[in-house]
Image (tube, rainbow, N blue to C red):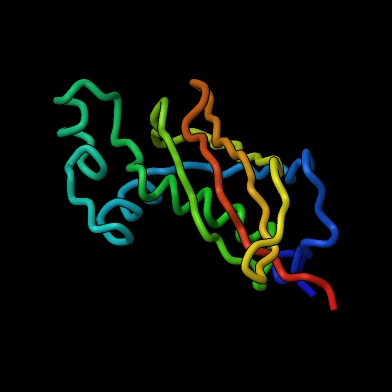
Amino acid sequence: MDQAAQNVYWDDVEIKQDLPEKNRKIDTTTIAMGATWATHDFMPVHHDRDFAQSKGAPDVFMNILTSNGLISTYLEQWAGPGARIKEISIKLSVPNFPNDNMAMNARITRKWEEGGEHLIELGFAGDNQMGPHAAGTAIMSLPKKG
C-alpha cells in the first residue's frame, strides 16, 4: 500500500511530534496555474512576468491560495484519507518565486476530543531560500483505532 494512502490514527500521535519535512520545487507553471486555473486569481503579478517586473518583483510570485493548497496537501498526505482539515490559518511573509524550493514542516501542538471527533492542532511552516514563506496553524480530525 502507498504510504500516502495510509491513515495516521489519533491514538498514535503525540503533542510535540514533528511531521516529516517535505520539499516542493516551485516553478512558473505551479505559480501561474495555481493562481489562474485553481484559484481564479487573475492578478497579472501571478502569471505575467513582464507585469510583475514592472511592479518591482523579479518574477511572477505565488498567491496565498496556492500556498494554502500546497500546505493543505502536505498535511493531508501525511494524515491519510481518513483525516479532515477542519480549520486552517495561514500568513505569508517572503514570496515564492519560480526556482524556489519550499521546505514544509509541521509539529503537533495540541490533541483533544470534542463532539465525538479526535482532533489535533498543528503549527506549520513553509520556508524557501529567502526565509519563511508561509506559517500558521491547522486543526485536523483524525480517525481513531477500533
Residue 75, image x, y percentages: 61, 54
Left/right placement of residue 48 relative to residue 100 reads left
Q: Nearer the viewer, residue 137 or 69?
A: 137
The single residue placed furthest to the bottom in the displayed view is 146
Q: Residue at x 33, y 61 (%)?
A: 38
The single residue placed furthest to the front in the displayed view is 115
Q: Nearer the viewer, residue 41 or 23?
A: 41
Q: Residue at x 52, y 60 (%)?
A: 86
The mark total stands at 0
Residue 141, image x, y percentages: 63, 63
Residue 21, image x, y percentages: 70, 41
Q: Residue at x 83, y 73 (%)?
A: 145
Can you say whether 9 is above or below 74 in the image?
below
Q: Residue at x 49, y 54 (%)?
A: 87
Left/right placement of residue 133 relative to residue 60 reads right
Q: Nearer the viewer, residue 58 or 126?
A: 126
Q: Tell me the quadrant of the picture where the C terminus can be found.
A: bottom right
Q: Tell me the quadrant of the picture where the N terminus can be found.
A: bottom right
Can you say whether 38 is above or below 51 in the image?
below
Residue 27, image x, y percentages: 43, 43
